[in-house]
Image: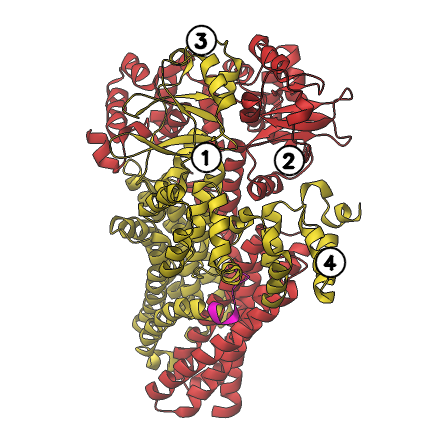
Chain colours: A yellow, B red
C-alpha cells in the first residue's frame, strides 16, 4: 500500500495515514461533511484526537462541526489540554455532559479537570445523580494524585467465593469495566486482601476457592499518592493494574497500566522541558503562548548573564591591557556551564527514578568531584596549550588552565549537590538547579580567569 | 512503621526499606551470610536488583557470594547492563546458563545480550536444545527490534474453538506464560487473525465461538520494527499486549506492556541525556567511565567555543577601543544559545512523539521564527535600555538590541529546522542539533554584536 511505503511501516498499524490525511484536508476544503464523517468514523479515538490536533484552528472548527454528534467521547480523553478546551467550547456544555457520562470514571474526571469551575458545575448538573456523585468524589482528590488517576469500575469479590462462582458472576453482571487484568478480593469491611490475575483465574478449576489462588503480597496504592510515584511503583514491579485504597485500607478504585504509561511519558517530558527551560508548551501552542512561556524562562538566563557581565566589568582595565582575555574568557564559562549541566542532568534524572537516595548521596557527590578534577586537568592541558600557542604567551595558557580546573571541580561539586539540596527544600530540581548552576559557573569562570590574569599577567 | 515515616509512603509498597538496607549493610559488615540470605529471600527480584545496584563493588561481591545459588534469576533482568555483567562474571557461566534457562524468553534474550560473544556461546551450549533454539532465533532479530523485545510464550488457539474449549485447554496445558492478557486466534497457516482479551473470554458463555467475540481489527507488530516505535504504538492505542508477526504475517511472539514501559522510560532518558550531552552513563558508573564519556561530549563544546573565540579574535581592535563590548558580548551569545536550545528541545521531543510530521512542519518552523521575532524585540528593548544606561552610551544599547534580534530569529529558524533536517539525514536529532545550534548562535551572536559595533561605534 502507498501509505505503508510512505511511513516505512505497515499501514494497518496506524489508522491515520498520510493519504487519509490528504483526503480529509480535501474534504474540509470543499465542505463535504458527509465525506468527512465517512473518513472519520472508522478511526480509533486516539487517531481522531491526533487528526484534530494536527489541523489549524479554522479547520479544526470545521471538522468538529462536520462530525457533530458522531464525535467519539473517548477521543476527548486523548486530546491535549488546550485543544480539548477549544473543542469542548465549540461542542457546548450539554454535549460535553453527554460525552462525560459515557466515559469510564478516570477518563471522565480527566475531561472535567480541563474545564473551569463554572463549566464544570454546568456539566456535572446535567449528569445523572449516581454517576455525578462518583465523579464529584473523584474530583475531591488532590490534582496529580492516584485518586484522580484511578477508575471506579472494577471487579471486587468476597474471599469465600470459588473460581466457578466468580466466573458465573462475571458472566451475568452487566456493570463491569470493559477490560480488567486483576480481580480484587475484599473482606466484609471492603478492605482489599488479595488479588487474582485474570489469567490465573482462567486456568484454575471451578471448585477452587479464591483464597487458594489469590496473591496476598501485592501493592495497595494510597489514593493520596502522587501519580509520579504511582508510575514508579508500576514500573518497578512490572504491574498491569493495582487496587487503590483510602486511609483506612478500604478499596476505592483501580489504576491500570495504560494510565501509567501516559504519566511516565508526561513526567519524562516535563523534566526534559524544565532542564531546557522551556516550560509547558508544545509544537501546537500559539505564537503568543509560546513566546510568553519562553520569555519567562529567558528572563532567568538574562539575570544569569547580567550577573556574569558585572563580574567581567570589574576587570575592564585588565582586558584593556590584554585583549586576548576577552577572546578566551567565554571558553572557561561555557566549558564549566556544560560540564555542570551534564552533572545536573544525571543527578536530576537519578532523583526522579530514585536511583539516588540517602544510601549513595555521598558516594555520588564525591565521584562527581573526582570526575571534575579529571576533566579539569584534561581540558586545562588541551586548552592551556592551544591558548599558549595561539597568543605566543605561555602564562596565558597557565592562567586559563588553572581557571578551567577550578570551574570544572565546582561544576562537579555544585552540579551534584545543588539538585539534591533543592529537592530537600521541596523545589523541583529540574527547574531550580540549572539556572543556579549556570550562573555560578559563569561567575566563577570569568572571575577566576580574569582574576588570575590580573594577578599574574599585568 | 518507622520505614513508612522515613519515605512518606506506606512501607508495604517498597520491599527495600531504609531500615532493611541498614540491616543488610550491618550483616555484610559482620559477614553473617545466613542473615543476609534471610533478609534477601522475601525481596521482589526488582528490589533485589536495586539493592545490588546501590552497594559498592566490594559489598556487591560479598552479597552475591552470600546469596549464592538462591539468587532469583529474574533479578538479573532488572539490573542495569554494567552491573549485570559484573554479577554474571562472578556467578560464572554455568550458573548463568541455569538462570537463563529458567527465565521467559524475552528476559533470557535480554540477559544474553549483555554477554560478549564467547560467554554467550558458552552459556547457550549449556542450555537444553529446544530452549536454545528459541533463544538463538530470538538473537537473530536486530538489536532494539520488536523481535528482541517479544516473548515466545503465548496462548494461541484455532478460530473454530468455543470459549469452553479454550478454558479447558488453558486449565490442562502446563506450558503457558505466567501472565497473559490476550488470547491470540490463529488460522492453519499460523497467521494471527484475531485477539480475545482475557476479561472478555471470562465473561462469555462456554458454547460461544471465539470468532464471535474476537477482535478482528487489532495491531500486528512486525518483528523487525524498532522498539521505540513499538512503544509509541502501545502508548497511542492504550495496548496491554500485542502479537508479533514475521514478514509473512505469521505469529512469532507477543509483546506485553511491562516491557514497553521500560522502553519508554529508557528512550525518554536517552533523549534527555543526549540533549544535555551526557551520553550513556548513570550515577552508578565509575569515575573513569564517567569522565571518559563526559570528555567526549565536552570536546564538542570545546570546538564550539574555540570557533566562537576565533570570531571574537577578529575584533580585538574594536574591543581594545570599547571594553564595554567585552562585558556585554556574552549576553548576546547566551541568550541566543538558550532560546535556540528551547526550540531544539521542543522540536526534538515533538519528533520523538511524532507530534511533528510532514503535515505541520511548515507551520511549526514559521511559528518559531515568529516567536524569535517577538522574543528578540522584547529582549532587545530590555537589554538595549540596560546597556545604554549602564555605559551611558545609547548607541551601544542600539547595537546590542539589533544583535539580539538577529540572534533570536536565527535561534527560532535554525532551532526548528536543524533537528528536522538532521532526522531526515537519519542522524539522531537529540545528539546532533544542540552542538550545531549552540555553535551558530555563539558565532552569530559575537559576530553581529562586534561587527555592528565596529561599523557604528568606532
- Residue found at x 35% / y 21%: A217
Q: What whole-number distance in Å separates the C-alpha atoms at marks 4 and 1?
A: 36 Å
Whether marks 4 and 1 lie on the same chain: yes
Q: Nearer the viewer, residue A219 or A328?
A: A219
> In this rendering, is residue B99 above or below A121?
above
Judge left or right: residue A157 versus residue A250.
Answer: right
Image mark for residue A208? 3
Q: Mark 4 or mark 1, which has the lower sequence index?
A: 4
Image mark for residue A256? 1
Residue A190: image quadrant is: top left
Q: Mark 1 or mark 3, which has the lower sequence index?
A: 3
* Magenta region includes residue A22: no
Q: Position of residue B84 (x, y in %)?
A: 47, 27
Q: What whole-number distance in Å separates the C-alpha atoms at marks 3 and 2?
A: 41 Å
> In this rendering, is residue B122 above or below A109?
above
Q: Residue at label 2?
A: B145
Q: Position of residue B146 (x, y in %)?
A: 64, 34
Whether marks 3 and 2 lie on the same chain: no
Judge left or right: residue B22 versus residue A52.
Answer: left
Whether marks 1 and 3 lie on the same chain: yes
- Residue found at x 61% / y 61%: A65
Chain of the residue that carries numbered disc 3 in the rendered image: A
Quick one: SS at disc 3? loop
The answer to whether residue A220 is visible is: yes
Count of numbered circles in the view: 4
Q: Nearer the viewer, residue B234 or A273?
A: B234
Q: Mark 3 or mark 4, which has the lower sequence index?
A: 4
Amino acid at each position: 500500500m502507498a501509505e505503508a511505503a510512505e511511513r516505512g511501516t505497515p499501514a494497518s498499524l496506524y489508522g491515520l495515514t498520510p493519504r487519509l490525511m490528504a483526503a480529509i484536508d480535501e474534504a474540509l476544503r470543499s465542505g463535504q461533511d458527509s465525506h468527512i464523517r465517512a473518513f472519520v468514523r472508522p478511526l480509533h479515538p486516539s487517531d481522531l484526537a491526533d487528526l484534530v490536533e494536527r489541523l489549524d484552528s479554522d479547520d479544526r472548527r470545521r471538522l468538529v462541526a462536520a462530525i457533530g454528534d458522531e464525535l467519539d467521547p473517548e477521543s476527548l480523553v486523548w486530546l491535549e489540554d488546550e485543544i480539548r478546551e477549544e473543542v469542548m467550547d465549540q461542542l457546548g456544555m450539554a454535549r460535553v455532559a453527554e460525552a462525560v457520562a459515557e466515559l469510564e470514571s478516570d477518563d471522565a474526571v480527566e475531561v472535567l479537570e480541563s474545564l473551569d469551575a463554572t463549566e464544570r458545575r454546568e456539566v456535572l448538573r446535567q449528569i445523572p445523580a449516581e454517576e455525578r456523585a462518583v465523579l464529584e468524589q473523584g474530583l475531591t482528590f488532590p490534582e496529580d494524585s492516584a485518586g484522580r488517576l484511578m477508575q471506579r469500575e472494577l471487579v471486587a469479590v468476597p474471599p469465600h467465593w470459588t473460581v466457578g462462582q466468580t466466573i458465573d458472576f462475571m458472566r451475568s453482571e452487566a456493570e463491569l469495566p470493559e477490560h480488567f487484568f486483576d480481580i480484587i478480593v475484599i473482606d466484609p469491611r471492603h478492605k482489599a486482601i488479595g488479588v487474582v490475575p485474570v489469567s490465573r483465574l482462567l486456568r484454575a478449576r471451578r471448585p477452587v476457592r479464591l483464597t487458594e489462588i489469590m496473591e496476598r503480597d501485592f501493592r495497595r496504592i494510597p489514593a493520596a499518592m502522587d501519580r509520579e510515584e504511582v508510575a514508579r511503583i508500576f514500573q518497578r514491579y512490572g504491574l498491569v493494574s493495582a487496587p487503590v485504597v483510602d486511609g483506612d485500607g478500604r478499596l476505592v478504585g483501580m489504576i491500570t497500566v495504560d494510565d501509567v504509561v501516559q504519566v511516565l511519558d508526561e513526567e519524562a517530558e516535563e523534566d526534559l522541558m524544565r532542564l531546557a527551560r522551556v516550560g509547558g508548551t508544545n509544537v501546537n501552542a500559539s505564537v503568543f503562548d509560546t513566546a510568553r512561556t519562553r520569555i519567562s524562562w529567558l528572563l532567568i538566563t538574562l539575570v544569569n548573564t547580567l550577573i556574569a557581565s558585572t563580574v567581567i566589568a570589574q576587570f575592564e582595565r585588565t582586558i584593556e591591557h590584554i585583549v586576548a582575555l576577552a577572546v578566551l574568557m567565554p571558553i572557561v564559562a561555557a566549558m564549566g556551564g556544560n560540564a555542570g549541566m551534564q552533572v545536573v542532568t544525571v543527578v536530576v534524572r537519578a532523583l526522579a527514578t530514585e536511583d539516588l537516595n540517602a544510601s549513595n548521596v555521598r558516594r555520588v557527590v564525591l565521584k562527581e568531584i573526582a570526575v571534575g578534577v579529571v576533566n579539569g586537568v584534561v581540558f586545562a592541558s588541551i586548552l592551556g596549550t592551544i591558548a599558549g600557542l595561539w597568543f605566543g604567551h605561555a602564562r596565558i595558557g597557565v592562567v586559563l588552565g588553572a581557571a578551567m580546573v577550578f570551574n570544572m571541580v565546582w561544576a562537579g561539586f555544585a552540579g551534584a549537590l545543588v539538585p539534591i539540596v533543592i529537592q530537600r527544600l521541596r523545589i523541583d530540581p529540574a527547574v531550580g538547579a540549572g539556572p543556579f548552576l549556570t550562573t555560578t559557573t559563569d561567575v566563577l569562570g570569568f572571575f577566576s580567569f580574569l582574576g588570575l590574569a590580573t594577578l599574574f599577567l599585568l
